[in-house]
Image (spheres, helix red, strand yellow):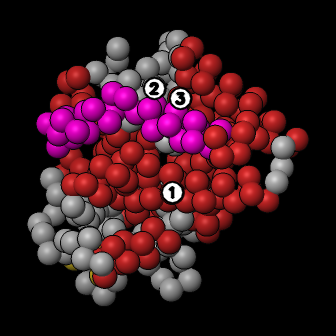
Amino acid sequence: MQQITKSGSPGLTFNSRNIFIVISFHVIALAALFTFSWTNLAVLLIGNWIVGGLGVGLGYHRLLTHRSFSVPKWLEYTLTIFGTMSVQDGPVKWVSTHRIHHRYTESSRDPHSTRAGFMWAHLFWILRGTAQDHNSATMAKYVPDLIEDKIHLLIDKFYYVPLLVSGAALFLIGGIPMVIWGVFARVVFGWHSTWFVNSAAHFWGKRRFQTDDDSTNNWLIALLTFGEGWHNNHHARPSSARHGLRWFEFDLNWMTIRVFEKLRLASRVRIFDQESQVVQGRVAEPSPSLNA
Ligand SMILES: [Zn+2]
Ligand SMILES: [Zn+2]
């Protein structure tokens, strides 16, 4: 195993496990074209918000990777379990990759640098080399907070179980068509939405902040990802829980954090103050390795 995936390195082998998973999900998702119903569409959209919004954007990204707010452990684990159903690997691997992305953005050590091309950043990095299978030294360096948490290690190890349970539940409710829409089509839609943050939101859009990377604010990707597409704002201030900084920058994940706060479920919420140009919160800044 390599310590860090080298972007675009011609020496990388193909990752047969990931290629099999990505192709088979896409092929089965095509069956959605022949099994449409409004109920199945609703299952996909609601499932995509639970998994992509609450799980990946709020859980894996803003909470676990950047610790931009805190919630009770039971809620942290619940959001993480939602995130596992995205089939983007477990929380330990996902968070490792994303912290490395922030530390080495657009360099040869960035797992999905756009300098190696749009398709590399979007998808090909997943299909080559070790992808997110970081070795133990890398994980000890980047996710010490997660690997000392036994519950997160357990969720990471059995990350595919919640998806299997949800698939069985959907089968009992709506048969194979609902599984096609609620699992396979939903996963493929969620994949490309997340992957567009790595690709399109480093290629196309506006740059409010002159960061050292190519990150952009892309309204379309923000709509697809419940606010994660305000990616230039995010790279400028990674520890801010709020990504959409202006009133017109729709950020449903931020609105959800505000609801959690009103319900007294979220605390120590960090926000980017536009006047003072600093991230304000009720706790100290996280260590540079989370933020660099
Ligand atoms: Zn990025
Ligand atoms: Zn981030």
Crowding at dot 2, Cα within 10 Å, few <14 / some 14-19 / many 20+, comes out as: many
The answer to whether residue 183 is above or below residue 53 is above
Between disc 1 and disc 2, whose residue precedes? 1
Element marked by disc 1: helix
Residue at 28% x, 21% y is 135
Describe residue 193's horizontal placement relative to residue 65 as left or right.
Answer: right
Q: Are marks 2 and 3 in contact (CB under 8 Å)?
A: yes
Which residue does the numbered mark 2 point to in the structure image?
Answer: 131
Which residue does the numbered mark 3 point to in the structure image?
Answer: 126
Inter-mark Cα distance, 2 to 3: 5 Å
Inter-mark Cα distance, 1 to 2: 25 Å
How many numbered discs? 3
The magenta stretch spans which residues?
144-171
Element marked by disc 2: loop
Between disc 2 and disc 3, whose residue precedes? 3
Which residue does the numbered mark 1 point to in the structure image?
Answer: 50
Give, as a three-letter code, the residue at label 1: Ile
Q: Which mark is residue 289?
A: none
